[in-house]
Image (spheres, rainbow, N blue to C red):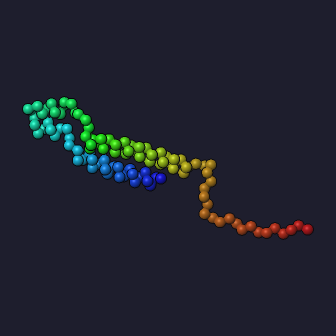
Amino acid sequence: MFTVILAIHIIVAIAMTGLILIQHGKGADAGASFGAGGAATVFGAAGSANFLTRSTAVMAAIFFCSSLALAVHARQQSEDQYRLDVPAVSETTPAPIEPVAPVE
């Protein structure tokens, strides 16, 4: 389960980075058309979010959830490592049992 969550986390991180890099910034419009109403497009109504913005939001939510799942798993793993009531697994073999002679 840990490996699956980690794989999803890495894939989402790469996809989210790509989505963020291909998006068009809001400040680019103001610099290109300074004056002539350029400020109205930057500070005016934003309108509905496009596909890239919504995809980035979904990827960010998945990234957040997978980060929490990995953190919970890491904490549980570290608590199990230092717990005293769980017997440690031993690699030694037990001593052979010798037959008991009957009492007469």
Task: Tell me residue 49's x, y (percent).
Answer: 26, 38
| Nearer to me, 75 or 84 | 75
Give how far across and how far down residue 101 sits, in percent. Answer: 84, 69
For the view shown, which residue lies furthest in the left direction?
36
Q: Residue, x 63% and y 64% (percent of image)?
A: 92
* Residue 92 or residue 50, whichever sits in front: 50
Q: Please identify the residue farthest to the right as the structure is shown.
A: 104
The residue lying at 43 percent from left, 53 percent from top is: 4
Whole-percent x and y of residue 97? 74, 67
Among the 4 quarters of the image, the one containing residue 67:
top left
Q: Quadrant of residue 93?
A: bottom right
Q: Residue at x 30, y 41 (%)?
A: 54
Q: Position of residue 88 (x, y in %)?
A: 60, 56
Q: Is residue 63 left or right of residue 47?
A: right
Q: How many labels, in total?
A: 0
Q: Residue at x 79, y 69 (%)?
A: 99
Position of residue 81 in the picture relative to residue 11 (left or right): right
Q: Is residue 102 left or right of residue 80?
A: right
- In the image, 96 versus 23, the foreground residue is 23
**Is residue 104 positioned above or below 25 on the image?**
below
- Towards the viewer: 4 or 85: 4
